[in-house]
Image (cartoon, grey):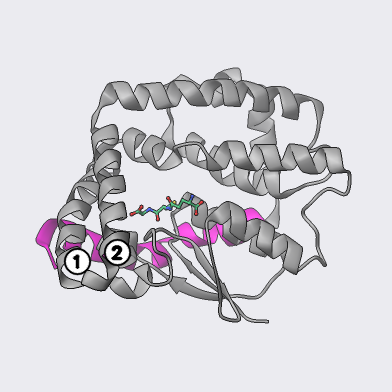
Amino acid sequence: MSLELYHFPDSLCSQKVRIALAEKGLEWKSHIVNLLTFENLQPNYIRINPKGVVPTLVNNGNIICNSAIVIKYLDQNFPETSLTPVDPALQEKMNQWISLQDSFPMRELIYGNLKGLDGFVARRSVMMKQDIISKLMREHPDLHNQYATKLKDVKDWNITVLEKAKVKSINNTMNPILDKLENEVSNSMWLCGDEYSLADVVWTAVLNYLVQLQIDDFAIKKDRKAIYLYIDRLKARPSFKTAIQDYLETKVMQPIILAGLRRIFLGF
Ligand SMILES: N[C@@H](CCC(=O)N[C@@H](CS)C(=O)NCC(=O)O)C(=O)O
């Protein structure tokens, strides 16, 4: 079996899949798709992932999009190290935690809350996507439908991240989820009891991002002690280093960021 992953180092959805791969000890081939130079919008990528998003998993010619589906696919097809509880009630709970995350507008939350230069670059890149997609749509009529859907998505995304009230309201909808999470992990080691599962995979990436964004609304360090300790447990797992930290090292990120800054500010 051969596993290939199209991903971006600092993308939350890519991190989810890389954590699952690391936890399961699977070998895979990496293809970095630079979101900052809009590689995800190029026709060759749109042909494998019609939504133009990362990650995409390719397994012996099977293409699997959407991180929640990818991690479940990996767990079902490579069951040696299982990340799914045996108890059906816990399986149900795991699926609920995964769906809750999957349906949350994380992309809007991240791009809306990023501060300083990072925020400026991220929001400018979303704005630029609109012209780039329109041009690609004209040049590739066979991909008209995919580009038209992506253009609408990007326009909505751009409007949301530029409106402070909308971003604030997204932040507010995260708070009850964090309350629920706080309650869950104050009574157990992991989200579905004593065994680490795919639910923990997903929430490692999200919580790490929320901490990095330093959003005052969430007060994780100050007011959510159980989550804070839970994050420490997640970070202590070797998968955190392999799937997140190693990808954020300067030697990995610097060329990607420099190419992105050149594309975003100089146009080539
Ligand atoms: N629900 C999808 C969301 C994928 C997604 O939004 N990926 C982001 C990075 S985390 C992306 O590719 N953004 C670039 C874009 O939308 O143009 C999944 O879980 O795979």
Mark sitting on residue 41: 2
Q: What kind of element bears circle 1?
A: helix
Residue 39 vertical placement versus 153 (above, below): below
State the image quarter where residue 64 is shown: bottom right
Residue 70 vertical placement versus 153 (above, below): below
Residue type of the residue flagged with mark 2 = Leu
Position of residue 236 measured from the top left corner of the image (x, y, whole percent): 69, 48
Main structural element of the magenta stretch: helix, strand or loop?
helix
Q: Are marks 2 and 1 in contact (CB under 8 Å)?
A: yes
Q: Residue at x 49, y 41 (%)?
A: 209
Classed neighbour count for the residue bearing mark 2: other residues with Cα under 10 Å, few (<14), some (14–19), many (≥20): many
Magenta region: which residues?
239-268
Residue 241 placement, left or right of 196: left
Residue 58 vertical placement versus 174 (above, below): below
Residue type of the residue flagged with mark 1 = Leu
Position of residue 36 measured from the top left corner of the image (x, y, whole percent): 29, 59
Residue projecting furthest to the right: 87
Position of residue 136 measured from the top left corner of the image (x, y, whole percent): 19, 66
Residue 146 among magenta residues: no
The residues bearing labels 2 and 1 have C-alpha atoms spaced at a distance of 8 Å
Classed neighbour count for the residue bearing mark 1: other residues with Cα under 10 Å, few (<14), some (14–19), many (≥20): some
Asked if the residue at label 2 sits under 8 Å from ligand 1, the reply is yes
Q: According to the image, label 1 marks what residue? A: 136
Residue 267 among magenta residues: yes
Residue 137 placement, left or right of 196: left
